[in-house]
């Protein structure tokens, strides 16, 4: 033990070496080498994803479906005026079961009956089967009740 305490006596009091040809590392970078190490890369993101809630898609009753059909038909009949509407629709989650209800407001460019999509002027395409509701000032102007 006595020998171990005297192993570095010859260098312990020497001045710290500073290179004359290389710049010193900035303090911020020096501190990074002592920062904590994430052994499980991506684990925090996985936990966040697991905690994220999704919703199930609501099934509309016949009256709600009939009202949606009526509104979409009115839009189709007046498509040349590119009516501005707000559509609330179900957006399936990319990573897990369920999804969320989101809304989009804009001017309708066309309704594609073959692909069953409502297409907005900004290029947004919403599947008709995922639509939950359609509303907007345009319907009040033509006297359609919600």
Image (tube, grey):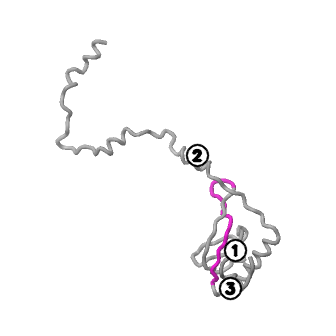
Outermost residue toward the top?
A: 2
Residue 10 belongs to the span the image colors magenta? no
Eye-nearest disc, 2 or 3: 3
Determine whether the residue tagged by mark 2 lies in a helix, strand or loop: helix
Is 64 left or right of 86, judged from the image as shown? right
Q: Which residue is mark 2?
A: 47
Q: Which label's residue is closer to the chain start, 2 or 3?
A: 2
Report the quarter where the C terminus lies. Answer: bottom right
Image position, residue 60 (x, y; %)? 78, 66
Residue at image point 71% right, 69% down: 131
Eye-nearest disc, 3 or 1: 3
Image position, residue 78 (x, y; %)? 69, 86
Residue at image point 72% right, 77% down: 113
The answer to whether mark 2 and mark 1 are in CB contact below 8 A is: no
Outermost residue toward the left?
A: 20
The magenta segment: 82-97
Residue at image point 66% right, 72% down: 87
Q: Which residue is mark 1?
A: 134
Image position, residue 134 (x, y; %)? 70, 74
The answer to whether mark 3 and mark 1 are in CB contact below 8 A is: no
Depicted 20 relative to depicted 73: above or below: above
Residue count near mark 1 (Cα–Cα under 10 Å), binned few <14, some 14–19, many ≥20 = many
Q: Which residue is mark 3?
A: 141
């Amino acid at each position: 033990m006595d020998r171990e305490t005297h192993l570095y006596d010859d260098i312990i009091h020497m001045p710290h070496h500073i290179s004359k040809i290389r710049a010193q590392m900035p303090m911020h970078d020096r501190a990074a080498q002592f920062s904590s190490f994430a052994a499980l890369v991506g684990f925090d993101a996985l936990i966040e994803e697991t905690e994220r809630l999704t919703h199930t898609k609501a099934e509309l009753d016949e009256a709600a479906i009939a009202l949606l059909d009526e509104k979409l038909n009115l839009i189709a009949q007046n498509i040349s005026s590119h009516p501005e509407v707000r559509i609330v629709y179900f957006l399936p989650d990319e990573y897990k079961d369920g999804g969320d209800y989101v809304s989009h407001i804009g001017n309708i460019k066309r309704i594609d009956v073959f692909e069953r999509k409502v297409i907005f002027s900004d290029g947004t395409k919403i599947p008709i089967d995922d639509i939950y509701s359609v509303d907007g000032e345009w319907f009040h102007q033509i006297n359609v009740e919600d």
